[in-house]
Image (tube, helix red, strand yellow):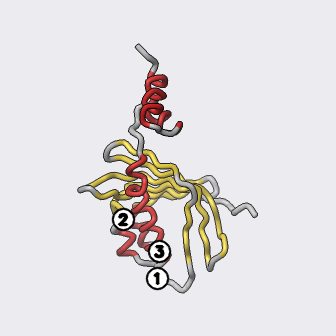
Amino acid sequence: MRHPLLRSFSIMRKHGLSLAAGIALAAGAAPAMATDAAVLEPVHSFFDAMSRHDQAAMRAQVLPKGTATLMRKGKPMQLTLGEFVDRVKPGKERIEERIGQPQVLVDHELAMVWAPYTFLLEGKPHHCGTDVFNLVRVDDQWKIAAIADNSRDCEP
């Protein structure tokens, strides 16, 4: 019997897949090429709504009883996603969270997004870190089930 990695590389050559997709195949995960945009849609919509302080639009992207774990100075702060949304009050401050080069993994109705981020306050970097989103597909729509992030000063 051939090693799964060799079988994956054969599939990669046959279908022109990338090394990352081959490694995902070897690990037993389905390649997510066709669904990356669909998985990222609720993440981008969540951040767009957050920048507008639009709680209703944020809630539309999440499972309200999902969790948010925010690592601050080495200590976890945990709340539901509904509570997290409640903290984004309409205000005068301009806020924006930008993610860069997300990694997306998908297995049927489960997905994960891992991405570096920069949080901007009044257009200037306030803090940076990594966002991790767990998503589930419900009635053919991706919903954010959990968010975890860490936070540090942005490097110049």
The residues tagged by marks 1 and 2 sit, at their Cα atoms, a distance apart of 18 Å
Numbered mark located on residue 88 in the image = 3
Dividing the image into 4 quarters, which one contains the C terminus? bottom right
**Quadrant of the image occupied by residue 105:** top left
Q: Could you say where residue 55 lies in the image, as x and y percent from the top left?
A: 39, 75
Q: Looking at the picture, tell me which residue is in the foreground, 11 or 95.
A: 11
First along the sequence among labels 2 and 3? 2
Q: Please, is residue 126 above or below residue 130 in the view?
A: below
Task: Farthest residue to the top: give it.
Answer: 1
Q: Could you say where residue 118 lies in the image, as x and y percent from the top left?
A: 61, 64
Q: Amino acid at mark 2?
A: Gln
Numbered mark located on residue 90 in the image = 1
The residue under the point 45% across, 58% down is 68
Mark 1 element type? loop
First along the sequence among labels 1 and 2? 2
- Name the residue tied to disc 2: 61
How many other residues sit within 10 Å of disc 1, few (<14), some (14-19) or many (≥20)?
A: few
How many other residues sit within 10 Å of disc 2, few (<14), some (14-19) or many (≥20)?
A: many
